[in-house]
Image (cartoon, rainbow, N blue to C red):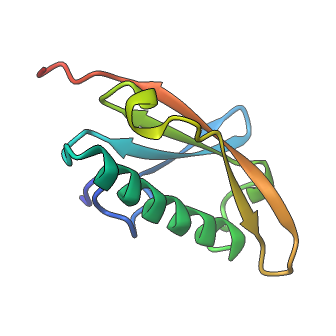
Amino acid sequence: MESLMLEEPNIIDMILDEQGQAVLVVVDAAITEDKVQRRKLLDAKLQNYAKALAGGNLKDLPDPQQAKIRIVCADPPEAVYGGLNSLSIASSNGQAYTIPVTFQHLPSRYG
């Protein structure tokens, strides 16, 4: 099984189906402690998510333009990702659209 984590930029951690809407999940388990580096890792991962959505590489999605991204993070999101709420994507046919980005703070039970 591949790792589900921020430090693997070329892997889509998880895709959920929530009432017919695709939710692409990024897992930030706070393995990288430096906040600036974590933001850079997230930016790289989101760029790969955008490429996958724009390029039609996720053919099982009902409508990639209706997808959303959820970042599940061990630390409160404001501390690392303040201000991030959407991702702009240009599809292969030149159409631009915006995908909402939401956060779910899920503290580690291991402290």
In the image, residue 72 lies at what x, y percent?
42, 34
In the image, residue 98 lies at what x, y percent?
77, 53
Q: Quadrant of the N terminus?
A: bottom left
The image quadrant that residue 51 belongs to is: bottom right
Q: Nearer the viewer, residue 109 or 22?
A: 109
Task: Tell me, yes or no, if residue 39 can be seen here.
Answer: yes
In the displayed structure image, the side of residue 23 where residue 111 appears, left or right: left
Residue extending farthest to the left is 110
Q: Nearer the viewer, residue 70 or 77?
A: 77
* Residue at image point 47% right, 59% down: 43
In the displayed structure image, the side of residue 19 where residue 5 appears, left or right: left
Task: Tell me, yes or no, if residue 4 can be seen here.
Answer: no
In the image, residue 40 lies at what x, y percent?
39, 59
In the image, residue 50 lies at what x, y percent?
62, 65
The image quadrant that residue 102 belongs to is: top right
Q: Quadrant of the C terminus?
A: top left
All told, the count of numbered labels is 0
Q: Taking 56 as reference, is 49 above or below it?
A: above
* Residue at image point 74% right, 58% down: 64
* Residue at image point 22% right, 24% down: 108
